[in-house]
Amino acid sequence: MTDTTEAVRQAAGTRTIRMDVARYRPGQDAEPVFQGYDVPLMSDWAVLDGLNYIKDQLDGSLSYRWSCRMGVCGSCGMTVNGEARLTCGTFLTEYGEGPVRIEPLKGFPVIRDLVVDIDDFLAKLSSVRPWLIRRARTCR
């Protein structure tokens, strides 16, 4: 974080929360490590907003997935303080003063940082057919 960004935040009186994020870069890291970031603690910020702040303002090398921001697609699923959560619907204020520990979903191979390989999951998904199938009705 630049000194200017920190000075502006302190002048505005913005509280911060610590996010400890799992980092894993294949070819560089033997195993995942945690890196801490201080992000603004805004009342309307989800964990995903905190991750976006980190990527946009503090560390552009952070990798994670997200898509709809509406709790529908599931692409932002991560482990937050030990629980599988959708980061778009999990608010930073739920964790008090923090820290908030962000890890990839458990049970999936990690590609990089918070990105997991879901290819096997998607291949099996159609065999369980997790959607509603309406019975054909005839008109009378």
Image: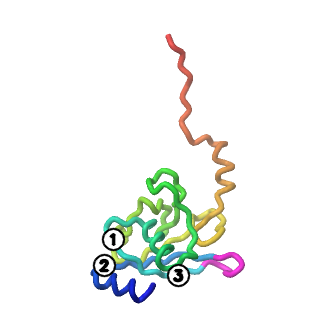
Residues shaded magenta: 25-32
Secondary structure predominantly adopted by residues drawn in magenta:
loop
Q: Is residue 119 left or right of residue 3?
A: right
Residue 29, by quadrant, is bottom right
**In this view, 140 is above or below 29:** above
- Which amino acid, mark 1? Met
Image point (47%, 69%), residue name: 52
Residue 14, which numbered label?
Answer: 2
**In this view, 91 is above or below 6:** above
Q: Are marks 2 and 1 in contact (CB under 8 Å)?
A: yes
Name of the residue lying farthest toward the bottom: 3
**In this view, 111 is above or below 8:** above
Q: Is residue 61 magenta?
A: no
Give the CA separation, mark 2 to mark 3.
Answer: 22 Å
x, y percentage for residue 99?
Answer: 42, 78
Name of the residue lying farthest toward the right: 27
Q: Secondary structure at mark 1?
A: loop
Q: Which residue, given by chain and number where applicable, does mark 3 sit on?
A: 35
Residue 106, which numbered label?
Answer: none
Give the CA separation, mark 2 to mark 1.
Answer: 8 Å
User: Which residue is nearer to you in this view: 98 or 27?
Assistant: 27
